[in-house]
Amino acid sequence: MKIRVLIVALFILVYVNVNAQRVVIIGLDGFSTEGFNGSKHPDIDRLFEKGLITLTNRPVMPSITLPNWTSHLTGQGPEEHGITANNWTMENHTLKAIETDEQGYSPSIFKVLKDKKNNAKTAFYYNWAELINPINKKYLDEVSFEEGDRYKDNYAKALKFIEKNKNDPTLVFLYSVHTDHAGHEYGWMSPQYITAIEEVDVEIGNFINKLKEQKLYDDTYFLFITDHGGIKKGHGGVTMNEMQIPLAITGPKIKNLGLTDQFFNSNKNTSLVLAKLFGLKNIPKSWTGIAPTVIFK
């Protein structure tokens, strides 16, 4: 009898681990293709060496922060989610979203994941206060804001969250605005902007190494995204400096395409890619993005 119970317990453990699916989104605000080409980022390169990196991803318009991160996380453009400026709040906005949940928010990937998978765990780590405004916190298990452009404590919290929920489908959004702020203060492609990229690359490497030590790396998908580029000390226009950005993805079912321009991609495709990775069906009608089939095995 004891042997039988042990066998059943082992089967359950293996089953849970095999079916656990984890996606970590690493987001750097204002990280342009020009910045990617002009900086050193060996840890980012190493992370995606068995996946793909494209340098021709496009922001939605306008090329500013809140509309683009909302597009990443809701599968829509500003014409659908209604967010056209950084000062959007639930209480003060002009353009209505074409689809909302019961609390008035556009349906995010966090909501869709939670609705479809009861045991899914979600986390949102950020250091720009306005970023959370369009996201319904009801669908987030952990939310952490770090002040003063700092981000290392959030990386540590994300590690703990992943370890704690290692047997559940997990979506972690790990964002930092410090790269964008370096561009605004000193200029895109300034030495300080390049340093901001290269310093966080080291932290990303430390984060990945710790996941490997905890045996949480091999079954994890990693998605590296940004919102827009910049020119001089600003952004919001339609120059290629602002409208061309990198995107990278790797994981068990992602093709090894290396540095590629084989497909067109937009920020509003991100949630569709995530939905496909998690096997989610019946996505919201307002999601107008696509999941590029060329990236999947």
Image: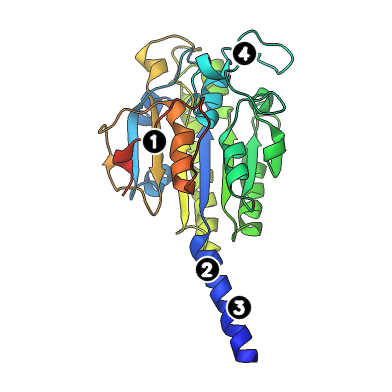
Q: Secondary structure at mark 2?
A: helix
Image quadrant of residue 65?
top right
Q: Position of residue 99 (x, y in %)?
A: 59, 22
Q: Which mark is residue 96?
A: 4
The residue at which mark 3 appears reads as 9
Q: Position of residue 185 (x, y in %)?
A: 57, 17
- Whichever of callouts 2 and 4 sits on the residue coming sooner in the sequence is 2
Q: Residues within 10 Å of mark 1 (few under 14, many from 20)?
A: many
Q: Secondary structure at mark 3?
A: helix
- Whichever of callouts 2 and 3 sits on the residue coming sooner in the sequence is 3
Q: Calculate the distance from the C-alpha at mark 2 to the C-alpha at mark 4.
A: 44 Å
Given residues 19 and 87, the one toward you in this image is 19
In the depicted structure, whether residue 286 falls above or below residue 236: below
- Residue 186: tell me if it is visible: no
- Whichever of callouts 4 and 1 sits on the residue coming sooner in the sequence is 4
The residue at which mark 2 appears reads as 15
Q: Amino acid at mark 4?
A: Lys
The residue at which mark 1 appears reads as 291
